[in-house]
């Protein structure tokens, strides 16, 4: 079974309210050493996310230099400049927030973080309330999986669904899987390796399969 978000998330998320002041936010970032906070309403439902980078806009751009502002406007998105004048979390936050559910897979969380370039994701329940936080470090926890457990899943679950298990040898060392054997067809071999790559905890796959010759090559002898 794939690892799901609630298995690795932090269950004590630190959030801020939409009315939290700039100074309060700055102090909390220093205190907790995180990169972002979920912003919640009075019922605990997520309204957005505020990051330390959002606060940096004030330091970088809110200096009263009109010449600099004119130059920056041509380079930086207008919303970033607007944040330079923000005074509350509601003004600073990004909304809607990118979130994930407790029962989503860690693989899905990793994909979201990678494609959206995020370090943390708020975990929300069906009512939209924040119930946890999952970070990049939490996602990497799947690579702590023991080698023998990975090998057992490959040999007892992955290979039997596609081919005859006795035709293969599987070795796992530090998450690197080496697969030897002879699949019935090239297609089955490629499909099998693709499935192995998606097994949790697999770092890399070494293809040592001996593939059968294509049908045309097998029936057609060498040219005279």
Image: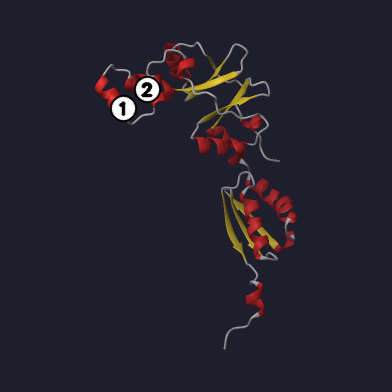
Q: Are marks 1 and 2 in contact (CB under 8 Å)?
A: yes
Indicate how the structure is coloured in the image.
secondary structure
User: Splitting the image into 4 quarters, where does residue 27 fall?
Assistant: top left
Residue 140 appears in view = no
Residue beneath the point at 55% across and 29% down:
98
Above or below, 119 against 11 in this view is below
In the depicted view, which residue is nearer to us: 194 or 72? 72
User: Splitting the image into 4 quarters, where does residue 4 fall?
Assistant: top right
Helix or strand or loop: what does disc 1 sit on? helix
Q: Position of residue 80 (x, y in %)?
A: 40, 24
Number of other residues with Cα within 10 Å of mark 1, as a class: few under 14, some 14 to 19, many 20 or more: some
Residue beneath the point at 28% across and 25% down:
70
Residues at marks 1 and 2, CA–CA distance in whole angstroms? 8 Å
Q: Residue furthest bottom?
A: 224
| Disc 2: which residue | 81
Helix or strand or loop: what does disc 2 sit on? helix
| Disc 1: which residue | 72
Q: Position of residue 209 (x, y in %)?
A: 62, 64
Instruction: State the mark number for residue 49.
Output: none
Indicate which disc, 1 or 2, sits on the residue closer to the N terminus: 1
Where the N terminus falls, by quadrant? top right
Residue beneath the point at 50% across and 10% down:
19
Is residue 67 found left or right of 201 in the rendered image?
Answer: left
In the depicted view, which residue is nearer to us: 194 or 79? 79
Q: Position of residue 42 (x, y in %)?
A: 60, 11
């Amino acid at each position: 079974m794939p690892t799901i978000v609630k298995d690795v998330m932090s269950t004590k998320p630190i959030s801020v309210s939409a009315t939290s002041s700039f100074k309060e936010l700055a102090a909390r970032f220093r205190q907790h050493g995180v990169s972002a906070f979920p912003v919640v309403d009075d019922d605990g439902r997520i309204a957005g996310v505020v990051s330390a980078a959002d606060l940096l806009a004030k330091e970088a751009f809110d200096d009263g230099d009109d010449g600099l502002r004119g130059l920056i406007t041509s380079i930086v998105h207008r919303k970033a400049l607007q944040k330079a004048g923000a005074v509350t979390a509601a003004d600073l936050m990004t909304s809607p927030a990118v979130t994930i559910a407790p029962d989503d897979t860690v693989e899905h969380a990793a994909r979201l973080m990678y494609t959206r370039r995020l370090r943390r994701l708020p975990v929300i329940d069906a009512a939209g309330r924040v119930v946890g936080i999952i970070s990049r470090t939490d996602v990497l926890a799947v690579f702590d999986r023991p080698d023998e457990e990975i090998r057992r899943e490959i040999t007892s679950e992955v290979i039997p669904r596609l081919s005859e298990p006795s035709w293969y040898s599987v070795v796992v060392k530090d998450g690197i899987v080496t697969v030897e054997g002879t699949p019935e067809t090239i297609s089955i071999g490629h499909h099998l390796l693709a499935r192995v790559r998606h097994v949790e905890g697999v770092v890399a796959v070494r293809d040592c399969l001996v593939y059968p010759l294509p049908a045309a090559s097998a029936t057609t002898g060498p040219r005279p």
